Amino acid sequence: MSETFHAMWRSLRPIGRSAASGGYRRYAWTEADADCRLWFRMQAEARRLDVETDRNGNQWAWLGDPTAGDAVVTGSHLDSVPDGGAFDGPLGVVSAFAALDELRARGAVFKRPLAIVNFGDEEGARFGLACVGSRLTAGRLTKEQAYELRDADGISLPQAMEAAGHDPATIGADPERLAKIGAFVELHVEQGRALDLSGDAVGLASAIWPHGRWRYDFAGEANHAGTTRLVDRRDPMLTYAETVLAARREAELAGAVATFGKIAVEPNGVNAIPSLVRGWLDARAADQGSLDQVIAGVEAAARDYAGRHGIDLAVTRESFTPVVDFSDTLRDELAKILGEKTGEKTPVLGTGAGHDAGILSESIPTAMLFVRNPTGVSHSPAEFAAEDDCVAGVLALADVLEGLACR
Ligand code: GLV
Ligand code: MN
Ligand code: MN
């Protein structure tokens, strides 16, 4: 199995990789995304699985009858953040195929249909909203809302889908598909150091923090950087900078995290005071009350600064995902299966990262397996998981799938 794992890893590695940064730029409905989709299809066909792309652009590879019901589904996503790492998403998809190889080598007999899934546009790097494929399927993003999404060049999501050969006319909730799924298990590289600190290769997910994205538009007045007196300026960059510091302060106060990681500046000239600074705030906390506190605190500070600098401020919530508590029943079942195999207790941990499994958790029983990340670094080319831990992850996933689908 570890041979097929490595062969898959090698063949996926060059797709969408930036030679300059060493990171991945696999954005929804781009050429790199098409290459990832082709890769998925080839892996599925090599294993004699039936491949389909659903109405919302998610890819499914089926072993058994998709219409039979009570299917066990595993997989993750292949898209990336700008200059993302190799593991966030792909580890779950590669491990899914490798786990199937492992189960076939064990001579497993499947009593439930099995599917491997590649969810479309999990990171939201291009259109700003994360988990578009699973949100549409779960009815947590409507067709009308999806049609409003645009990338930085003004291309709408339906235009991008169409250009990539996917008909956007029928996107939207897909309850019939979800009704045929009995369990979804997503394996993912850990995006923190909990497993490294506990000394475990694999863990189970308890919960996902509530999180969201807010767009801050600071509008001021463009003017000459050399000739405009400081007192005459309406400089939105100053208000933006003060808001970044406020986000850090509010996050510290609430025991949360808050990040301005993306910014757009107009006109974006070295010698011009900006007319507009647009910054995106990503905020997450262990509970809703703490998150509300951060969001309210940052906005109040921004409005205060804006008032004092003559800046017009508009704040728009672009996405929000409430707290996810994964199914206790499914997690306990997975813990029991893994405990029987290893004789050890699998650690259970929460995460501040969003996942398709979280989006689907309101509709179907979902669970997640995490694989140790020794540095905890993620959303960066430095993201890493050791070979032995990846193999441990595949074996754990195989055990879980066997326990769910073959008994
Ligand atoms: C996705 O990885 C997210 O947590 O934003
Ligand atoms: Mn991610
Ligand atoms: Mn991910």
Image (tube, rainbow, N blue to C red):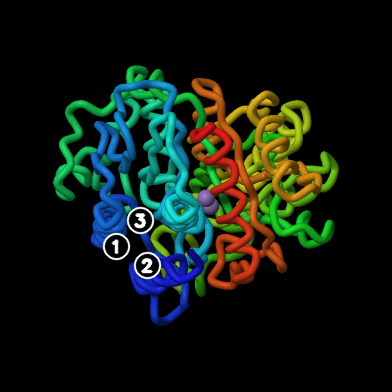
Q: Are marks 3 and 2 in contact (CB under 8 Å)?
A: no
**Residue 12, disc:** 2
Q: Secondary structure at mark 3?
A: loop
Q: Is residue 106 above or below residue 285?
A: below
The answer to whether residue 324 is visible is: no
Q: Is residue 386 left or right of residue 118?
A: right
Question: Closer to the camera, 252 or 124?
Answer: 124
Dot 3, crowdedness within 10 Å: few (<14), some or many (≥20)?
many
Q: Which residue is mark 3?
A: 27
Q: Position of residue 177 (x, y in %)?
A: 34, 24
Q: Nearer the viewer, mark 1 or mark 2?
A: 2
Q: Residue at horizontal 49%, vertical 38%?
A: 356
Q: Residue at horizontal 50%, vertical 35%?
A: 406
**Residue 32, disc:** 1
Q: Nearer the viewer, mark 3 or mark 2?
A: 2
Q: Position of residue 300 (x, y in %)?
A: 70, 35
Q: Secondary structure at mark 1?
A: helix
Mark 2 residue's CB less than 8 Å from ligand 3? no
Q: Earlier in the sequence, mark 1 or mark 2?
A: 2
Cα distance between the residues tagged 3 and 1: 7 Å
Q: Are marks 3 and 1 in contact (CB under 8 Å)?
A: yes
Q: Are marks 1 and 2 in contact (CB under 8 Å)?
A: no
Q: Earlier in the sequence, mark 3 or mark 1?
A: 3
Q: Amino acid at mark 3?
A: Tyr
Q: Amino acid at mark 2?
A: Leu
Q: Residue at horizontal 24%, vertical 61%?
A: 31
Cα distance between the residues tagged 1 and 2: 11 Å
Q: Earlier in the sequence, mark 3 or mark 2?
A: 2
Q: Position of residue 209 (x, y in %)?
A: 68, 36
